[in-house]
Image (cartoon, rainbow, N blue to C red):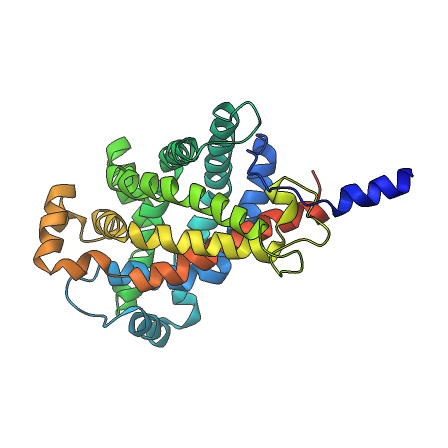
Amino acid sequence: SVLLSGKMAASRSVEPVVYPPTVNFTKNFVYGGAAGVVGSLFTFPIDLSKTLVQGDKAGQYRGIFHCFSSVLKKGGLRALYKGLPIQLIGIAPEKALKLSVNDYLRMQLRNKDGTIALQYEALSGGMAGFAQVIITSPMEMLKIRMQEQSKIENPALRKSFRTVISEIFNGGVRGVYQGACATLLRDVPFSILYFPLFSNIKLSLARSPADSIFRKPNSDHLADVNKRVSLAGTFTAGMIAGSIAAFLVTPADVVKTRLQGNERAHFRNIPTCIRLTLAEGPSAFFKGATGRLMLIGPLFGIVLFTYEFLPAYIPL
C-alpha cells in the first residue's frame, strides 16, 4: 500500500509555481562566472561587430554581417576577439552581483506561500540591473575602446591596452564611469524586462506536455518550475527573454556605445547624443539591433543552460 500511494503521488499532476531561489553568492560567482565565460567565447565576435556598427556614424559598414566580414578580412580571427580578456575578467563579479541582488530581493519580496508577484519580479530585476552597473560600465567602456581598435586599418595607429586604460584612469572616477548614466538607461530596463520574462516563459514551458523536450521526465508531481523544466527549456526561455529585452532597449545601447567609444567627444552627453543620432534618422537608434538579437538571445540561453548544467557535475 505504501508503494501504491507513492506511485499515485508521483502520477498526480500539480500546477507549476515560480519560487524565488535562495541567495548563494559563491554559487553565483563560480557558476555564473563560468557560464558567462562560455557564453562570451561563443558570442563575442557578434558583440564586437555590433559595437562597431553602433558607433559608425560615417556609414563605413552596411550592417552586422558586412562589419563581421570586414574585420575578419582585415585582422583575421584574432581581431574579432579584440577586448575579450577584459570581458572575461569582469564577467564573474558582474554575474555574481547581478544574480545575488536579484535572488536576495526576490526572497525578500516573495508572498507567504513562497511565490512572487510580477511587479516584484520587475523591481528585483531592475535593482539587479542598477547594481551591476558598478562593474559593467567601466568594463564595457574599456572593452568598447579596445574593440574599436579593430576598425583602424594602420596597425601603427592602433592603441595598446596600456594606452587605453591609462587614458581612462587619467580622468579619475569621472573618467572610469563615463557613460554610466547611459549604461543605467540600458541595463535597468533590460533587467526589468528580462527577469520576469524568463521566469514566466519558464512557467509556461513547465505547463507543456510531460513528453515535451522542454520538460524533465516524470516531473508532473513537482510544483517547482526549476524541477520541471529541462535544460532545453531553460536555454529556450533564456534565449527568448534575452532577445525580446535586448531588442527593446537597443536605442539605449546605441547611446551608451557612442558615449563610451572613441567618438565620445563628438557625442558629449546623453541629450546631445540623442539629438545627433536622431539627425541620422530614427533607424540609427536601432543600429546593431540584428547583432543584439543574435548576441543577447543565444548568450543568455547559453549562460543559463551552463548555469544549471554545472551544479550537476561540479557541486559546491
Who is closer to the viewer here, 194 or 26? 194
Q: Residue at x 44, y 56 (%)?
A: 240
Q: Quadrant location of the C terminus?
A: top right
Residue 117 position, x and y percent, is: 45, 32
Residue 234 position, x and y percent, is: 56, 52
Residue 85 position, x and y percent, is: 45, 52
Q: Residue at x 56, y 32 (%)?
A: 25
For residue 158, say whether it is visible.
no
For residue 292, say whether it is visible.
yes
Q: Residue at x 34, y 42 (%)?
A: 187
Residue 307 horizontal side relative to residue 282, left or right: right
Residue 84 position, x and y percent, is: 43, 55
Who is closer to the viewer here, 241 or 249? 241
Against 125, residue 273 (above or below) is below
Against 62, residue 314 (above or below) is above
Q: Residue at x 42, y 32 (%)?
A: 124
